[in-house]
Amino acid sequence: MAAGGYEKARPLLENALDITRDAKAPDSEMCGCMLDLAFVYKNQGRFAEAEKMCRKGLELQEKINGPNHPHVAHTLRILSEIYQGQVRYRRAAEALERAIEIMQKVGDDDGVEIAPLQVDMARLLVTQGHYARAESMFAEALTAIESSYGPDHAYTAKVLTSIARLCMLQQRHSRAEELASRALTVLEKVYGENHHFLVPAWLVMSKTHHVDGELEEARALLDRSLAVTSNRLDNGRFGESDVLNRLAEFHISREDYRRAESVLRKALKMLENSQDATSDRTAAALNNMAKVHINHDNHTRAQELCLEALDILERVFDEHHPHVADVLETLARSHRLSGNESEAARLRKRADQIRGQKRLAYVPARALTTESLRWR
């Protein structure tokens, strides 16, 4: 499973669980099978099955070890990832907060055991648009991770990739390129040069090449990412939709709206048939499709798509998320070009207010406690 061969692992684990049930095996064996299977379901995008199996495994685990055991914290971490796959970010945060609280009580003083949970929380904060708070938490965790795993470990490289993605969102392109390049060097040694685990770093590097005007390099990495994700047998469609949306952005920036529309139609169809149908991924694709319709002077349709994207984002997050500002800016452009300058000005003002909110202000790492991360 470490290399991502979940399609092969699933029937073996399902069979193992049936055997333990029939043999009335001890709770510890049943629990292990359930949690392994939950992990596989999660990585295949089968989140409803994953949640059911994980919650059953967690119940047995708490019965065996008590509610404040490190193993419980590890399971809560998996449950948080499942909730994130279901676009249930508040529940994801609650599970992670409980896991962190457990490890703060029983973990070592050097922070090694709590660092992966901090990384997960930082990634969740990025998703929620709390970039400065995520940066602080990443910085605190990375020191412990590099000292324990080492600079050439695959997990260290994946954390660096996550930080690189955050840097891109903060417009810190040089730092993003530096981190992604370092991560790729490690990941290629561990997994080879064409593994899907490299895709997140390729997407960051593609963006940095694009910003630097190196369009051929940017497009080559996008094509490479698409080839890898589209050929996957398990859980590939979620990664593929991300790549397609990024490819559409590339085409839009080059004013190649015909190709952008073709790519976005494929992405939206894929998302429509998945649990991501009402997720921030879909909202991003709808926003990009609105840009295509603006180019076609079809402002009625563009505004409909923007409103649909806003509805998704405000339900998934809130009305103050940075992605909401992105859509508002698209919507404002459509109103301006269609002659409604007053509405455009109102939307731009709202977008600017979101950009300048305190949620993007710097918070020192020492001030980040589970209480300060409590969901609002």
Image (cartoon, helix red, strand yellow):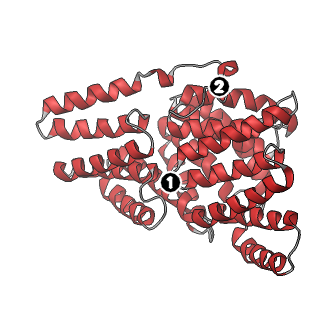
User: Please, is residue 221 above or below residue 32 in the view?
Assistant: above
Answer yes or no: is residue 254 visible.
Answer: no
Amino acid type shown at disc 1: Asp
- Which one is nearer the viewer's eye here, 303 or 151? 303
User: Which of the numbered marks, if any, corresponds to residue 242?
Assistant: 1
Confirm or deny contact between disc 2 and disc 1 (CB under 8 A): no
Secondary structure state at the residue bearing disc 1: helix
Q: Residue at x 87, y 36 (%)?
A: 148
Of the numbered discs 2 and 1, the one sitting upstream in the chain is: 2
Residue picked out by circle 2: 136
State the image coordinates of residue 126 (x, y, percent, origin top left). Answer: 56, 36
Q: Nearer the viewer, residue 363 or 227?
A: 363
- Residue 85 in sight: yes
Q: Residue at x 82, y 68 (%)?
A: 30
Using the numbered discs, state the Cα–Cα distance from disc 2 to disc 1 in whole angstroms. Answer: 26 Å
> Which of the two marks, 2 or 1, is nearer to us in this view?
2
Vertical comparison of 198 with 212: above or below: below
- Identified at 49% across, 62% down, the residue is 275
- Kindly identify which numbered label has been placed on residue 355: none
